[in-house]
Amino acid sequence: MKLDILAIGAHPDDVELGCGATIAKEISLGKKVGVLDLTRGELGTRGSAEIRDAEAGNSARILGIEVRENLGLADGFFQNSKENQLKIIEVLRKYKPTVVLCNAIDDRHIDHGKGSRLVSDACFLSGLRKIETVLDNTKQESWRPKQVYHYIQWKNIEPDFVIDVSGFIDKKVESVMAYSSQFFDANSKEPSSPISSMNFLESITYRAQDLGRLIGVAHAEGFTVERFVAINKLDDLI
């Protein structure tokens, strides 16, 4: 199966929080979208790896993504190593995404920056034909995504571009709340965490509203890039 977009996150829920509305919009436009989680989030303050596995599946169904895989790397301790790069290369060559969306380049959680660099490096290396990978006893062809974009997470990083996601913020919030173990629940007996507050839950919407305000729409999501953003003509911009 060839994907148009592969969204990658260090933890289950990274993708939904960072670009859930963008994914929902692209799927509505007929794009095939998949998600790759690098870890199972087993070090999270609340819930467990098994609970988050189930929550990730529920969220995937809400968004309508084509496929979701988990590499099972060590939460908190994975490194940008050859071994891990090759694991991601296998997935990239399997699904041949045109666009990859991945973690913020710099963020509060150390896994986000590490995941960002790991995925970016793997995307480049995946295009080198002399790096050989085998999947299901078949040698894979080299493949390099056309674009790699980084979604915004905890830190309010200034985006290089924003996407109008008006009409899709409710779907994003629904996909995020599929991770009921992680976010605000007045009846939860779990320890509190930076993402379990009502303020954080509300920030999903008000941050999108603020980015939307800046471009004259209801809601928007922002991304950063590692190279110039190119357009064909001036009226490509909204």
Image (cartoon, rainbow, N blue to C red):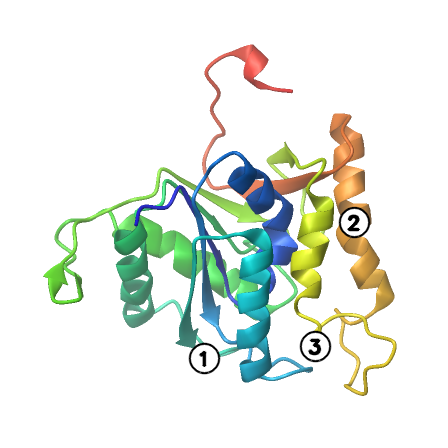
120 in relation to 14, above or below: above
Q: Amino acid at mark 3?
A: Ser
Disc 3 or disc 1, which is closer to the eye? 3
- Mark 1 and mark 2 residues within 8 Å of each other at the beta carbon: no
Residue at the image point whose x is 85% and y is 62% from the top: 199
Residue 58 at least partly seen: yes
Q: Residue at x 47, y 24 (%)?
A: 230
Above/below status of 214 relative to 35: above
- Dot 3: few (<14), some (14–19), or many (≥20) neighbours within 10 Å? some
From the top left corner, tell me how far across and down residue 188 is, in percent. 81, 82
Which mark, residue 74?
Answer: 1
- Residue 214 position (above or below residue 141): above
**Residue 21 shown left or right of residue 40 in the figure:** right
For residue 181, the mark is: 3
* Left or right of residue 213, residue 127 in this image: left
Question: The disc labelled 2 sits on which kind of residue?
Answer: Thr
